[in-house]
Image (cartoon, rainbow, N blue to C red):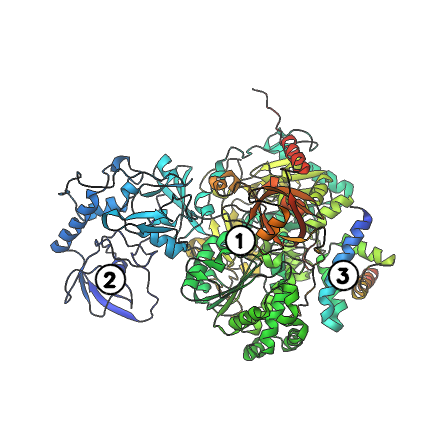
Amino acid sequence: MSPDDQDRKLVYMANQIATFFNSADDEAVSSIEAHIRKFWDPRMRAKIIAFRARGGEGLTDNAAAAVDRLSREVASA
Amino acid sequence: MGLVHEIDYGTKPSEAASLVTLTIDGVRVSVPEGTSVMRAAMEIGTQIPKLCATDMLDSFGSCRLCLVEIEGRAGTPASCTTPVAEGMVVHTQNERLGKLRRGVMELYISDHPLDCLTCSANGNCELQDMAGAVGLREVRYGYEGENHLDSVKDLSNPYFQFDPAKCIVCSRCVRACEEVQGTFALTIAGRGFESKVSPGMEESFFESECVSCGACVQACPTATLMEKSVVEIGQPEHSVVTTCAYCGVGCSFKAEMRGEELVRMVPYKDGKANHGHSCVKGRFAWGYATHQDRITRPMIRAKISDPWREVSWDEAIGHVAAEFKRIQATYGKGSVGGITSSRCTNEETFLVQKLVRAGFGNNNVDTCARVCHSPTGYGLSQTFGTSAGTQDFDSVEQADVILLIGANPTDGHPVFGSRMKKRLREGAKLIVIDPRRIDLVRTPHVEAAHHLPLRPGTNVAMLTALAHVIVTENLFDEAFVRERCDLDAFTHWAEFAAAERNSPEALAATTGVDPQLVRAAARLYATGGNAAIYYGLGVTEHSQGTTAVMALANLAMATGNIGRVGVGVNPLRGQNNVQGSCDMGSFPHEFSGYRHVSTPGVRQAFEVDWGVSLDAEPGLRIPNMLDAAVDGTFKGLYIQGEDIAQSDPDIKHVTAGLAAMECVVVQDLFLNETAQFAHVFLPGSTFLEKNGTFTNAERRIQLVRKVMTPKNGYEDWEITQLIARALGYNMNYAHPSEIMDEIARLTPSFAGVSFDLLEREGSVQWPCNETAPEGTPVMHVGGFVRGQGRFFVTEYVATDEKTGPRFPLLLTTGRILSQYNVGAQTRRTANTAWHEEDLLEIHPHDAEQRGINDGAWVKLASRAGETSLRAKVTDRVAPGVVYTTFHHPMTMANVVTTDYSDWATNCPEYKVTAVQVSPSNGPTATQQDYADLGRRTRQIEAVPAE
């Protein structure tokens, strides 16, 4: 699996999570972010944050916003 | 130690609350109204002679041996069919009764072979016992008359024989097949003297509809139906009660032994999960435990292309520790992990996750529940607050409506399937939601009220359509919702469900099901009385598996079908200890009792108890481990009792991940598929060789008791302990009970559990703690564990695994009665007689279009890969759908499945794969290569003679 494949897989997973939580309206982004934080190993989170930093192509809006929140959290830690 | 004998009261207990007092042989006794005289007598220790009666079956009154006298009544009524009455005075023995009974026995014995000394039932024969009990001293009729002594034995079944010469036509076997198993495979053919037990239409047992559950063998009072193992070995001399290691029903069995040799497994009548019933796997398919394929000495090799080299335990354990230390020193702490087994005990599972967290210093631990019921854990915890089913199995007896979705209990959970059939025969209504016409849709004396044959992958659409009907037709239980549930969440959900796009009519194009059928099913579920949901992997193994579990919880909450007996949401767990392995903290993000590793108070409790600091970050799940391995950051894996190279999806990816690792340690009974990629093989022990506990699908914790010395030298928990010590993390358990004490100390829902309690109570359902010292049969009574029940919007999202011109059919997978999971155990038993290979079920229309005949080889191709197997042309599957099992490794069914997975848990989408089927000449090149690989990688270096 190439690094691109890994990124594509993580993007796919993040978008799947976002699709479910989209119905949560105002809480959608925080729910997506919480789900990723709760269930993804740090190296997976680091990868998706890095991917987002490179533009995050393919991430849906809410998924991208959730990854941004993760990124801010890491930066402030 | 002797044989465990349950008391046979002769007839079933009465459930009546009111008591009746009578006098039996001068002794006053009070019993529930409706109790038989025979049972009342047994309650005071008086065993009335009997042959056709047994308390597993309804009274029959045919043998005429249990006659009694009742003052004020004429004649000598049969005590098994005579209910007690207030003031009744009964005499069970006097000269008249004795004479009558001897007369009856004379008739039986006059047509029975007198070969007691060489009979397989010698010492355990009710006919022999009764001859003694009635004082039979002579047979006046002689033996020269017409008889059945030359009847031919039926040896067709691999596990038991039928010797009609010894049959007394008591009908216990026929009634057991009907009442206990519900298959109706047996009957009494002929009349009068010609009467005889007949499987099916006078077929052999093997050719008949018999499912080999063993109920008839157990019920037989003579040697007519007898286990072949008893014929070969002899009668057992002691027995030990233990728990079956097959499916999640968790049947209790008596392992009946001679010394350390297992003679037979007999279902334990006092087992609270199975109440004395069994299936062909637990009852008979235990021969794998002593199969010649078992590896009993540790082995190592430098490369997977090298032959295995047998080594001492010290060398093997030392090698594992050295390798894992080297890998962590080179690639970092997070470069290794472990997989716990749902086939191992709670204690063994707990220890593996402890080894990973405390010994490896990370949270890279996962379990096979990842690929089966992880969506159940997440879905039910979010909606109800607990990652488990809500009921005990007994609850089904009070269900009025059963909604069965994505499960096939008569094959996957046969003993519970039989109980379900019994309830359905009593009048409960059945709704089946399944792409296949499973047996329960129409089986003897059972017919589903509604079968909704939906397209694979559309569960969420279907469940939301049901919700639409319930909401828009005001069939929901408003009072329940207001009292028990989060009202805002309900309102949000109800608005969603009521939307026109979610109506059965709007979703018919998606589900493929007649909307009127959906409406009728919804009305029945909501208004038919106690409605219980049972589901299996057909719900969870989808990209929306978690959403579907939530949708089921929504239905139960909306209709108030939760929190009491007869209702609930009940996952039917696949393996024997899936529930337990999840409970024990096998997931990378949580400790035992489903508490997240980042929760400070919880983590601190484990740190104090274990004497190490623990990682607060979640670890890698199995698919993530494999991704990371291919990515080069994950290099070492300890796998206890799982075969991910056969059971997990997209095998090419799995094996690429395994092949990329530097040290794969497999602990198992056999050189399984995963072991082909292993560097260390640690021989494991069977459930017969260890102590511990399993937790079944109803949260019931039951003891597993060691009945023989481990052939490999160690119980599995001991091996994990050796690894931990070699790594420098001290574990010092002398017995699994000490591990359970630690589990109880650290896990609130297990706080009251101990081996002492289990010895005393037989079993207990968690939560078991101060507030529920005897356990919790039904959950969420009076309120949800999470406080208010929470509804979730369950928007249907079609899977990205689409059919199209290249792959126009949908493949779904499942299991069959005689085989279990990857087949490592059952393939090494005579169960292969029923299923020697995996077959592809295909509808006649699809078969004809492709020129495929029944039994022909076909190629099954998907975007992930292709394999070949034989076709079975059947209308059990709908047009456009094909189905297969994955019990045989050479089928390579999971070469075809994709790596799409559930959004919340990464549970693979086994149940939906777009495929094409075409004629083929035999196995594919890949299958042949794989067979070659298996031969090469399973070679064991010859050990020079000493």
10 Å crowding of disc 2: few (<14), some (14-19), many (20+):
many
Real-space Cα distance between discs 2 and 3? 68 Å
Mark 1 chain: B
Question: Residue B547, percent across and down?
Answer: 65, 64
Q: Amino acid at mark 3?
A: Asn
Closer to us: B516 or B615? B516
First along the sequence among labels 2 and 1: 2
Mark 2 chain: B
| Secondary element at image label 2 | helix
Disc number for residue B673: none
Q: Left of B946 or right of it: where is B24?
A: left
Closer to us: B769 or B309? B309
Closer to us: B90 or B743? B90
- Which is more foreground, mark 3 or mark 1? 3
Disc number for residue A15: 3
Disc number for residue B37: 2
